[in-house]
Image: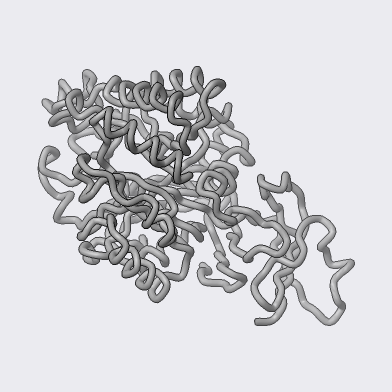
């Protein structure tokens, strides 16, 4: 690989407190050799012809902490190749994959298979999760120690929640001893049973069972109470309600933990469901506008650490059903950055805060050396035309499944190029 030179870019790297106009040099082995305002046309070798980015932005490659990939078992929905291509088009270079495949990622042999498939088929960095409990049944713990030694980066039951308080306490105790990261989907099943959308007047009008916000808050408060005793690495995958943000804000001064939010809950509310739009059947559900505003404020004041796509591709046959029968989830990895930039363009959140929640914060929680532009690191980054307008059309999506929650939405800001280890793997 030849050395590559980029100049006249707006560079944002929250980990290194970098927010300036400058350039980037990539070495022959795909590492970052130099970056910042000191890299410009005046101090580059005269024989080299740098690429002038004309004020476009360079961000570290995004780290998406919540992604479903269909291998093994659901390749018809998504596979490593299609996931990689979709991720690259959205500037995502590292993903954390969920364990709810078929079979479930809960033992060493399946982890070996998954790592081989990821290595052979994926163009991006794959960091797999294993389940907290065997077969994600919420009964018996998996072998955290053995799985962690095999390269499992975190443990979660995906879209399921540990309901048994005694079991959750034991999980936290083991996680503390083994220094493992636990990621919890917060939802009390007794309160959310048969629920499909937020419990409100909208649910009543549509004749659908509701999921009250207290179902989320009860699990959060229970887990944080347990965390006071067993101070393990604990992460709440997705918040959806204003009351949950209040609890997090009150407890963060006393207990060390982190939390995330889906870009869907930051950008949409229950009114967007309209007349039974099944592509907006999500978990956690879209809630009221005041909930969405509270989540945005939580991101702004850094109560919330991470933005995720919650990329859950579903084939059209699973979505073109009645609301009660339709599958839950939306494809979102391709639009994660552009939709997040909406918060910058409308003045809600600073650009650096958004990029931090998409890059260095998730990497820090996961303890991986990604999501930054430090000298000597792999040159994983994206180039973004931050003002470029475009419209989301499902036929233009790269993901194998097209179940986007924001079809026909007008967005501002588009990834034009994505690099992994110094190699350009996406270009429009």
Q: Is residue 192 above or below residue 267?
A: above
Which residue is outermost to the right?
A: 42
Q: Is residue 249 above or below residue 237?
A: above
Counting from the top left corner in percent of width and height, residue 395 is at 31, 61
Which residue is painted at 49% across and 58% down in the image?
A: 94
- Of 393 and 355, nearer the camera is 355
Residue 8 appears in which quarter of the rendering?
bottom right
Which residue is painted at 50% across and 40% down in the image?
A: 306
Q: Is residue 289 visible?
A: no
Q: Is residue 390 visible?
A: yes
Counting from the top left corner in percent of width and height, residue 244 is at 40, 23
- Of 281 and 116, nearer the camera is 116
Counting from the top left corner in percent of width and height, residue 245 is at 44, 23
Which residue is painted at 45% across and 18% down in the image?
A: 246
Q: Is residue 274 left or right of residue 39?
A: left
- Of 177 and 277, nearer the camera is 177
Q: Is residue 139 left or right of residue 369?
A: left
Q: Is residue 307 above or below residue 33?
A: above
Q: Is residue 360 left or right of residue 99?
A: right
Which residue is painted at 63% across and 54% down in the image?
A: 372
């Amino acid at each position: 690989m030849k050395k590559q030179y980029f100049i006249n870019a707006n560079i944002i790297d929250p980990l290194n407190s970098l927010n300036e106009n400058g350039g980037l040099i990539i070495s022959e082995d795909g590492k970052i050799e130099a970056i910042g305002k000191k890299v410009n046309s005046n101090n580059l070798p005269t024989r080299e012809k740098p690429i002038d980015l004309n004020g476009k932005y360079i961000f570290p490659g995004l780290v998406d902490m919540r992604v479903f990939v269909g291998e093994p078992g659901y390749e018809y929905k998504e596979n490593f190749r299609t996931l990689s291509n979709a991720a690259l088009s959205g500037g995502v270079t590292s993903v954390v994959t969920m364990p709810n495949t078929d079979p479930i990622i809960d033992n060493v042999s399946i982890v070996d298979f998954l790592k081989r498939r990821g290595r052979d088929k994926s163009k991006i960095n794959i960091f797999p999760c294993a389940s907290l409990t065997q077969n994600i049944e919420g009964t018996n713990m998996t072998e955290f120690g053995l799985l962690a030694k095999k390269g499992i980066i975190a443990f979660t039951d995906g879209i399921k929640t540990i309901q048994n308080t005694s079991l959750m306490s034991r999980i936290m105790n083991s996680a503390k001893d083994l220094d493992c990261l636990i990621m919890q989907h917060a939802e009390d099943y007794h309160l959310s049973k048969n629920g499909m959308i937020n419990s409100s007047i909208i649910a009543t009008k549509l004749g659908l069972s509701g999921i009250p916000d207290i179902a989320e808050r009860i699990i959060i408060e229970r887990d944080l109470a347990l965390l006071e005793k067993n101070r393990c690495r604990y992460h709440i995958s997705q918040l959806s309600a204003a009351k949950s943000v209040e609890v997090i804000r009150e407890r963060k001064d006393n207990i060390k933990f982190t939390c995330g939010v889906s870009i869907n809950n930051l950008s949409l509310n229950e009114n967007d469901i309209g007349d039974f739009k099944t592509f907006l059947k999500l978990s956690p559900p879209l809630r009221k506008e005041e909930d969405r505003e509270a989540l945005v404020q939580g991101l702004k004041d850094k109560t919330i650490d991470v933005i995720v796509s919650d990329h859950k591709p579903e084939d059209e046959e699973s979505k073109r059903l009645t609301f009660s029968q339709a599958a839950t989830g939306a494809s979102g990895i391709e639009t994660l950055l552009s939709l997040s930039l909406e918060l910058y363009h409308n003045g809600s959140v600073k650009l650096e805060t958004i990029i931090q929640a998409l890059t260095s914060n998730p990497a820090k929680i996961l303890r991986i050396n990604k999501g930054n532009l430090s000298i000597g690191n792999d040159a994983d980054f994206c180039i973004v035309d931050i003002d470029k307008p475009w419209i989301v059309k499902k036929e233009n999506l790269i993901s194998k499944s097209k179940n986007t929650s924001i079809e026909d939405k007008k967005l501002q800001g588009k990834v034009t190029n994505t690099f992994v280890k110094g190699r350009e793997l996406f270009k429009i």
